[in-house]
Image (cartoon, rainbow, N blue to C red):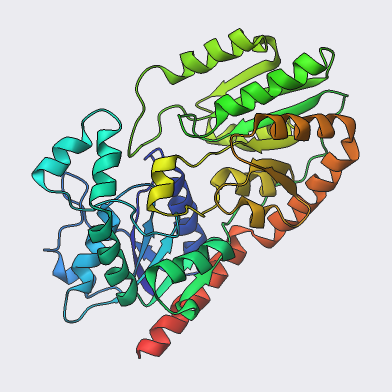
């Protein structure tokens, strides 16, 4: 089997690029040949390379993160009278691309203007975008989501049969188990790209509320991850300086530790040096006008791999992902609920231990070699049906 992969790949700074790189390696380890189409100077896949597409059995794309490139090329391939089967993993269901994938000259200019003009333009063109998403979805041989919640919502919104949308969990590497950190101090970790919209401000305010109620509380927080992600709508200003100023103003600067631009080789050690990962994500009102974003998180998959429970908000599909005794969800933007959850973890260390055990069990089930096997089975089925 020879598969062409349409996706961002490292060193692109995004969670989807990290996923695609790990997915490609796992598929290769299963004996599946995964090739990347030739690109032009702008990083696009020119349609002129007809010979390339005739040499592959199937084209698989990673859709999400606000990127339009993969979506547009699937449209081009779908328009051909003959060609390879097309499939895609949808990282941000219940939509495929979420905004106009090929804006006009005016739309491209608006995209570079200050907030909220790009988001308002996306709202204005949303109905046309949704029609294109549904047309593409109908022409794909299979769609994949990382959660059952995402699969249900995607099938409903794209108006395709639920049987064509497959749930294959986010893979994770196999990691040697390490016991929880010793000592009485609860070590919390935010891990992931650090940029506006991740709810980090809410987490800082919740920690400040815990400390205000219990000045002697044994709790610390580490903020770790990349600081230069590839973003669809980047925020202005020095966000790290804003977070540092907020922490200082809340009186918790001495409770924080920073691990910025964490090297890949240090991810496991960093996560396992903590008791619980905290993902305080929030979904903006502008996104909610377009649909319900119900994907999962690469950071969450790392927590499973490292055997660490997760405290998250009820955004995305976190309620499903943390329903097996491996963590807890609280309402997004609810500082009081987050503070109460942190306080309970301080008071009940056995709760932390139970979460860790369940997370490790999930991590074993979701090793990349297992996930690659599910994908290989799906692709074989698609090709067999086609034959």
Compare residues 15 and 108 and report the one nearer the observer: 108
| Left or right: 270, with 379 as reference point | right
Quarter that holds the C terminus: bottom left
The answer to which quarter of the image holds residue 200 is: top right
Q: Please tell me which residue is depicted at 70% across the width and 42% down the height of the picture.
A: 310
**Is 169 in front, or is 281?**
281
Q: Position of residue 95 (x, y in %)?
A: 39, 59
Residue drawn where x is 61% and y is 49% of the image:
301
Where is 311 relative to 360, above or below?
above
Q: Quadrant of residue 86?
A: bottom left
From this view, report whether residue 24 is shown above or below residue 281. Answer: below
**Residue 287 point in image, percent of width and height:** 41, 46
The number of numbered badges drawn on the structure is 0
Q: Where is residue 150 in the image (x, y as percent from the top left)?
A: 52, 62
Left or right: where does residue 280 sit relative to residue 88?
right
Residue 271 visible in the picture: yes
Lateral position of residue 97 relative to residue 360, left or right? left
Q: Residue at x 75, y 57 (%)?
A: 324
Instruction: Using the image, determine if residue 220 lies above or below residue 135.
Output: above
């Amino acid at each position: 089997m020879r598969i062409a992969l349409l996706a961002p790949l490292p060193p692109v700074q995004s969670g989807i690029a990290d996923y695609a790189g790990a997915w490609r390696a796992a598929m290769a380890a299963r004996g599946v040949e995964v090739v990347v189409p030739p690109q032009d100077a702008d990083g696009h896949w020119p349609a002129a390379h007809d010979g390339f597409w005739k040499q592959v059995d199937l084209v698989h794309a990673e859709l999400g993160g606000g990127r339009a490139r993969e979506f547009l090329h699937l449209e081009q391939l779908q328009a051909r009278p003959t060609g390879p089967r097309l499939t895609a993993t949808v990282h941000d269901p219940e939509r495929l691309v979420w905004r106009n994938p090929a804006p006009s000259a005016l739309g491209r200019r608006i995209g570079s203007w200050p907030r909220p003009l790009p988001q308002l333009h996306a709202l204005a063109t949303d109905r046309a975008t949704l029609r294109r998403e549904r047309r593409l979805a109908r022409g794909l041989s299979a769609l994949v989501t990382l959660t059952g919640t995402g699969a249900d919502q995607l099938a409903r919104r794209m108006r395709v049969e639920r049987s064509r949308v497959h749930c294959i969990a986010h893979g994770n590497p196999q990691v040697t188990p390490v016991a929880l950190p010793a000592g009485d101090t609860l070590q919390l970790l935010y891990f992931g790209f650090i940029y506006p919209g991740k709810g980090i401000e809410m987490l800082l305010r919740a920690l400040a509320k815990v400390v205000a109620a219990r000045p002697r509380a044994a709790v610390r927080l580490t903020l770790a991850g990349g600081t230069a992600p590839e973003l669809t709508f980047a925020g202005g200003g020095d966000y790290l300086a804003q977070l540092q100023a907020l922490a200082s103003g809340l009186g918790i600067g001495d409770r924080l530790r920073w691990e910025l631009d964490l090297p890949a080789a240090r991810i496991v050690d960093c996560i396992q040096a903590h008791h619980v990962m905290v993902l305080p994500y929030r979904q903006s009102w502008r996104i909610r006008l377009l649909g319900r974003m119900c994907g999962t998180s690469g950071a969450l998959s790392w927590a499973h791999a490292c055997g660490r429970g997760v405290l998250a908000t009820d955004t995305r599909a976190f309620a499903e992902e943390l329903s097996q005794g491996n963590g807890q969800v609280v309402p997004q933007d609810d500082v009081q609920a987050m503070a109460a959850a942190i306080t309970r973890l301080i008071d009940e260390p056995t709760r932390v231990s139970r979460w860790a055990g369940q997370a490790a069990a999930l991590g074993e089930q979701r090793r990349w070699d297992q996930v690659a096997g599910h994908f290989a089975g799906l692709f074989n089925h698609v090709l067999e049906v086609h034959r």
